Image: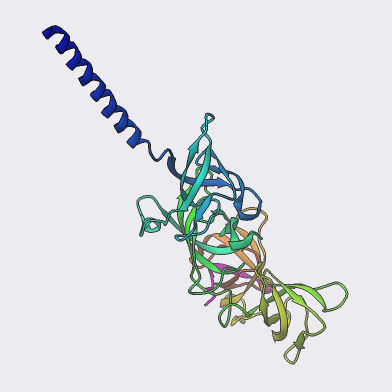
Amino acid sequence: MKSSLSKFAALIGLIITLSFGSTAFASDHDDDQFKFTGVIESLPNTAGFIGDWRVSGRTIHVTSATRLEQEDGRVAVGVTVKVEGALRSDNSVDATEIEVKAQAEGDDDDDDAQSTFKGTIEILPGAPGFIGDWRVGGRTIHVTGATKIETEFGPVAVGAFVEIKGTIRPDGSIDATKIETKSNVAGGDGRDEFKGMIESLPAGGLVGDWKVKGRTVHVTAATVIDQEHGRIAVGAVVEVSGTLRTDGSLDATRIEVRTASGSGSSDDSTEGSPATIKGVIQGLPASGLIGDWTVAGRLVHVVSSTKLKSEHGAFALGVTIKVKGMQMADGSVVATKVSVRDSN
């Protein structure tokens, strides 16, 4: 009898143990959701982001029922998000909620992981928010939706001088975490006015697209053109006013000639005397920077001893520079120092 009671008690204990164990297991899985945090690698080209996303190598299925939390930022390629949903057998996720995660304060200033680079914007992508590959100071800059862009000192535009922080890839390009404009393109607030040399004009008159200091200027019959100080021609320095487009080009409302073609800006006089030239680079050597340049219509000989200072941007066609050197008998200048001019 005692043996039977012992067996019965043991059986009851086992039942109780299994019952509580089963209850505990169920409570741990009441929220039957898979969660992970990763970086958006690709998005569907559909309204409301409905479709398949790629987040840190995993496929995320997003439907109209998926809740998108964008309080700390907008959904875009390169943005870090927290995903919740049901895990499929193929390791993809049926998302019930996706939350954009705010970048930790100071992450973009981590000097241990970040490199800093300064240069002049040469090419911008046409995508909204300037997402894509930029060309700055001869280097490719990869910009995503997570890149912080600060424009306190001027808008993002071709010709603006910027400071970039990010991670350098093995090919020398940079994955930008932060881009800050350090100067306007030129003049005023940098949005509707700049000065530069005319590099090309339309073939059939003045109406059409001009090239001024590396930028496209759209001229119409309504554009006021002031030629009091010289005629419109390639090489003339003009002041352009108008409305800035997102691609950096300008719809001109007024163009005023400031310096006639070929006059340049110099204070040199005779052979062997010190010479200074301020103007736009119109020609560069085919390879490297050592060789003959054309600056404001003048021939400039850059030699191995010439000091080249590019603190305010890279040497490129259309960039304004200051040349110091020695004048030759033919009017050319042997440069001792060449520096990119600050656009402020």
Is 331 magenta? The answer is: yes
- In this view, the residue farthest toward the front is 1
Is 198 magenta? The answer is: no
Q: Position of residue 162 (x, y in %)?
A: 51, 66
Q: Residue at x 49, y 38 (%)?
A: 86
Q: Is residue 219 above or below residue 335?
A: below
Any part of residue 123 in sight: no
- Report the span colored magenta: 330-344
Q: Position of residue 173 (x, y in %)?
A: 53, 49
Q: Residue at x 59, y 82 (%)?
A: 267
Q: Position of residue 126 (x, y in %)?
A: 66, 60
Q: Residue at x 60, y 77 (%)?
A: 191
Q: Quadrant of the N terminus?
A: top left
Foreground: 257 or 62?
62
Q: Position of residue 208 (x, y in %)?
A: 81, 74
Position of 15 with respect to 30 (left or right) is left
- In this view, the residue farthest toward the bottom is 228
Q: Residue at x 35, y 33 (%)?
A: 26
Any part of residue 50 in sight: yes
Q: Quadrant of residue 107?
A: bottom left
